[in-house]
Amino acid sequence: MAFVIGASPASYGSFRNSFLGSSVPSLCGTPQMMNQYMGSIEEREKSSGRHAGHTLLSTPGLDTSIMKRKSKMDTLHKATEEGKALRLKLLSGSVIVFINSGYKGKRFIYEKARDLGVVSIMIDSPGSWSEALVEEGILHKFIPIDLGAVDVKSQIVAAINGLADEGLAADGVMTFWETAVPLASAVAELLDLPGNPLKAIEAAKNKHETRRLMAVAGLPTPRNTLIESKDELKKAADHVGFPAVLKPIEGLLSIGVVRVNDLQHLIKTYTEVTDLMDGMYMSRDGQMGQVPKGSSLPKGAAMLKCQMMLEEYLDGVEVDVDVVMSGRKAVYCKVTDNWPTMEPWFNETGDNSPSVLPENQQYDLSKLCVGTLLALGLKMGVYHVEAKMTSRGPRLIEVNCRMGGGQVRDNNLAVWGVDLVDESLLAAIGLPNAPPVPAKPFTCRSALYFNAMRSGVMGAGDWLSEIRTFPGVVYAKLLVKEGDHVTCSLDGLPTWIGQIMCDGETPKEAIDLVKKYEEMVSPPIETPSSALSSLKCAPPLDMEADIDRALLAMCSQEGQAYRLSLLNERVIVFISAGYPGKKFIFEKARDLGVKSFVIDNPGSWSSELEGQGVITRFIPVVMEAETVVEQIVAAITGLAGEGYLPSGVMTFWETSVPLAARVAEALGIKGNTSNAIDAAKNKFETRRLMAEAGLPTPRNVLLTSKEDLPAAAQAVGFPAVIKPINGLLSIGVVRVSDAESLTKVFCETEDLMNDLYLTKDGHMEKISETGSLPEGAHPLKCQMMLEEYLDGTEVDIDVVLSSSKAMYCKVTDNWPTLEPWFNETGDNAPSMLPADNVKELEELAEGTLQCLGFSTGVFHVEAKLTSRGPRLIEVNSRMGGGQVRENNRAVWGVDLVDEALMAAVGMPNAPVVPETAFTCRSALYFNSPKTGVMGSGDWLADIRSLPGVVYAKLMVSEGEHVTCAEDGLPTWLGQLMCNGSTPQEAVDLVTKYADMVSPPVFKFRAKLPCFGSGEPVSSSPAATSMLSSTPPVASAMITPVVTVAPTPAPIPAPSPALVPAPVLEQKTMKKSASGTAGGLSSAFGKKATISDDAPSTANAANTANLDNSWGGNATYK
C-alpha cells in the first residue's frame, strides 16, 4: 500500500489530518476565500478580455451560479485528473514573469510553460541564452536587466509594472534557478503577488538559521555552530566533535562541503575552503568562476563567498524528499534514496525511486521535511529537501526552495505521474496544488553517476554508446567532453563524468541494471594529474621577456636561425629512443644545444648515449608499466628539482606518441592533446571525425566479431581492405576480393594480432613462443575494420603544423604497392601529379589534422588520389621514418627534426620553403622475388659508385629467411636511392640500376622448420636438403629468377586526368628486417625490427616456420 507521505497504515490518518488537510474542504483556504479568488478571475477576464475563452469559468453560456461555482471550487481542489485538468485550464493564458533563466538545460521548463498556454516573460542579464527563446516562440518577451545591479529589485518591479501598460499584467513571479530564488521572492512580495515570504526563503538558504528555527519548533537537528573566523575552530570542534562536516551556510553544488576528522584536518580544510570560496561566483549560464583580484563580478553572476559552519557528521542513508505544499499543507511528498556519497566531498553516486526504506522511516523523513518547511514559514510551492535517516532518526541536510535539478522532474513524472513543472507554475499564480498520485508507482527507476576515479583529462570516444540500446536503459549521458580536466576524490571535489538511468519493475531490478551496465564500461580518463601542483616546468617560450616575437614568427632564414638559436640550453625529455637508427635525432639535438633526457626501458641502446655525450641523461622506466605516466612524471619532477626545467616532452617512436602526449599534459606543457593523438591512432575514429567535418572518407565499418562480416561486406562492397584500427608495420592490412577471403583473412589476422607484440628493442615476437608478454613489450592486439578499396595513386604528405595551420606541406608519390599486402615498391619527390591534385591532397591533409584537434608539430600523412578525389589512408602524429627526413631536407631544404624540436618547446614553425626543389629524388625497394634464404655477397656493391646514386643499402644479411608476395608479406631485401634533375630522371636512374642486380635468394622446396637460435639455414643439413638447387658455395653460383611485379591495370581518370605512377620494370620490392635474427615465426619469421629510418645491414639469422598466410620480415616505415 502506497501513501502520499509514505506512512504506515496506523499513522497515516493522523499524518494526513496534520499535513494534508483532508479534514478541511479546501486546500487553499475556506470556501469563502476560494469563492472570492474565483470571482476575481472572472472580474479580471471581463475587464481585460485577455483571458476570454481560456478558462471554464468564462466560457459563454456557462452557468456561474453559486452551486456551479461551488462545484468547480470542489473540483479545483481535488487530487483527480478532472481537478488537474481544471487547474491547468485556469493556468492557460496567465502571465508569469521568470527571473533568471538558469543554464540551457532549463529550456524544457519554458517549453512546458508554452505548451500549457502560459504567457512567459523572462527577466535576465543582457546576453542571456534565453533571449533567443522569444524568436522561437517559447517566450513572449525578454527583458534585459543586469541581475547583479545594486538596484536590481527596483528595476525589475518597474519593468513588471510596465507590462500592465501592454495588457500583460503579471499573475506571478518565479524562478527555477537557485541563486535567484530570494530575488524572485522579494519581487513577488513587493508586487503583492503569490509567493512565500522573503524571510522564509532567506531562512531556508541559511543552513545555520534553518537549524535554529527547527530547534525552536522542536525538530531534531544535528549539533552545529557558526564559525566567524579561524580563531573559533578549536571552540567549534569542542562543541561539535569529530568526525564533523565543514560547510558554507549558503552554498551551491556541495562546494566547500568537506568531512573533517580531527582539529588539524579542520584547520587545513578551513583555510583551503575559505580561500576557494573567496571570489568564487556562479555565472548566469551556470558556470563556476573566480573573480581576479581588482576585477568586478561579471554581469548576472552570483557570488558564493559566505560564512562557514561546523556540523556533526551524520551516518546513515541519504535521501531526497520532493514536496509540493499548498495552503501550508503537503499535497505531495515522495522519497528517493541516494546511494552512499563520495567522501569527504559528499558527491552523489546514484539514486533510486521509489525508496526501498521501510514505510515508517519514509514517513518519519517526510514528517521532518514538511515540519521543517512549516517551521521556516514556507506555505506553498515545490521543494527539494535533502535529509538522512541516521541511527538516531531522520536529520535534515538542506532545503531548496524550488524544484530539484538534474533528473528530479523526470523521475517524479515517470515514477509517480506528477509533473513538478506544472505544480510550480500553478503555485506561482496562486492556484491550489493537488496532484493525483497513484497507489503504486508507474515504474521504478535508478540512476548512477560516474565519478572520476582518477584525475586527468577525458579521452576521446563515446564510452557509453554501447549500453544506450540495452534493455531498461532510459538514457546514458556523457557529462564532460573530450579534453576536459577531471578530478578524483583524492585530489578534490570529484567530477561527474557520466550518468546512466534505467527503469525496472522493482527498485532492485532498476538498481541491478545500472550496476550491471556500470561494469561494462571503462571511462577513458588519461594523464594522471596528481603531481600537477608540485611539478615544475619551464614557462612557455612566448612568456619570456627577452623574446623577439616578430623575429620568432618570421618566415625567413634570419627567423629560422633565431628559432634554432633559442633551442640552445632547452631541456627536452624524449619518451622512448626507438631503435639505434634514431641516433641521428639525438645527435642533431645535441648539435643545437638541446639538453636531452631520454626515458626508456632499462637496458635500452640509448643508455649508451649518455656516456658518448650525445644526451644529458638516460632515465630507465619500464614503458609498459601500468603506472608509467606517474613514474615518468615523478622522474621529471626530480629533474626540475635539480634545475632542469623541461620545456618539451616528445618522441619520434610511433608506439610512444600517446604516452608522450599524456606526460606533456601532466606537466602542463602546451602541445597536442592526447585526445587528438588517440583519434589519429584509431583509423575508425579518424574517419568518423573527418565525416563530421565534411571531409571525404572511404566507406568503412568497425568489426567487433566474425558475425559482423556479412553486414560489413554488404555496407562496404568488394574489393575491400581489412585492417587493424590501430596497427603497425602494415600487419593485418590485406586486400580481400570476396566474402570467402574476407572470412579467412579476418580469422587469420585476428589470431595473429592477438599473438604478436613489439619488444622494447623494436623486435616482433609471438606470445605463443615466448610464453608471456615480457616487461616493456607492446602488444599489437587491436580491433579490425573493413574499408572500401581505394584505386589511384598513393602518396605521402609531410606536414608541419603551427597554430593549426600548415606551414609546410609537401607531397611524395608512392609507386604501386604489392597487393594484397600493400607493400611499398618505391617513391619519388617532388610529386609528379598535376598541381591541382597536389593542392587537393595538401588540403585534405591539413583539414584532417585540424578536425582531429591538432595544433602543432610534424606529421606524416598517407593518402590516395583516387578516381573520386583524394582519400585518407592514415595519420602518423610524428615525423615519418625511413628516408622521409633526408628526402625533405634534400629536396626542399626543410629539416623535420628541427621543426619537431621547435614545436615540442612551444615555438612557432615557419620553415623557409623554396619555390622549386633543390634536387629530385627517387627510392626503390627490392621486394623479395622468392620465398627462401638470403645468400652471401654484397649484391648492391657494383652500383654504389654509379652517377646519381645517394645510397644502395642491404636490408637483410646472409642466412636470413625472406618471403615473396605469393607466400605472405614480402621482405624488403634492399633499397636504392638516386638524385636527378627532374623526378622522372631520378625514377629512370633507380629503375635502370635495379635491372643491373640480382638478389641471391635460394628457394625452398617445402615449409621450413625452425632450426634453433643462431644457426644459419644455409649451413644446416636439414635446410640444405630442402633447397631447390645445389647447396651454395658462393654467391657467384646463384642465378635466381626474379619475378617482375605486374603493372596495375589503368585506373579510370577523373577530370583533370590522374597522372599514373611511374611504370617500372622492377625487381619486386619492399620490407625486410633490420638488425634481425630472421623473420617473424609463423607470421614474419623469428624477428623483425621496426625501423623508422634507413636500416643497417642485418645480423646473422635464425629461421622459423612460415604459415600459409604470412611470411617475410618487416621494417616499419
Image: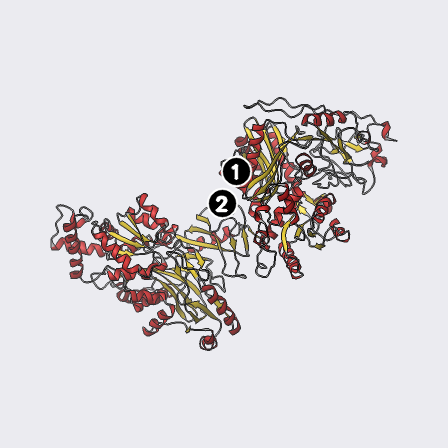
Quarter of the C terminus within the rendering = top right
Mark 2: amino acid:
Ser
- Can residue 654 be seen here? The reply is no
Name the secondary structure under disc 1: helix
Q: Which label number is shown at residue 690? A: 1
Under circle 2, the secondary element is helix
Measuring from the top left, give residue 605's x and y in whole percent.
Answer: 75, 49
Q: Which sits earlier in the primary sequence, circle 2 or circle 1?
A: 2
Around disc 1, counting alpha carbons within 10 Å, would you say few (fewer than 14), some (14 to 19), or many (20 or more)? many
Residue that label 2 marks: 465
Q: Kindly check if marks 2 and 1 are in contact, taking CB atoms under 8 A apart as contact.
A: no
Q: Is 897 on the left-hand or right-hand side of 372? A: right
Counting from the top left corner in percent of width and height, residue 444 is at 40, 53
Q: In the shown orientation, is residue 619 left or right of residue 58? A: right
Query: Foreground residue, 942 or 273?
Result: 942
Q: Position of residue 906 (x, y in %)?
A: 59, 49
Q: Residue 308: x and y, percent?
A: 43, 69
Please tell me in which quadrant of the rendered image residue 369 appears: bottom left
- Would residue 718 be found to the left or right of residue 444 on screen? right
Residue 1056 in which image quadrant: top right
Q: Residue furthest right?
A: 1033
The image's mark for residue 983 is none
Residue extending farthest left: 65
In this rendered view, identify the residue nearer to me: 912 or 737: 912
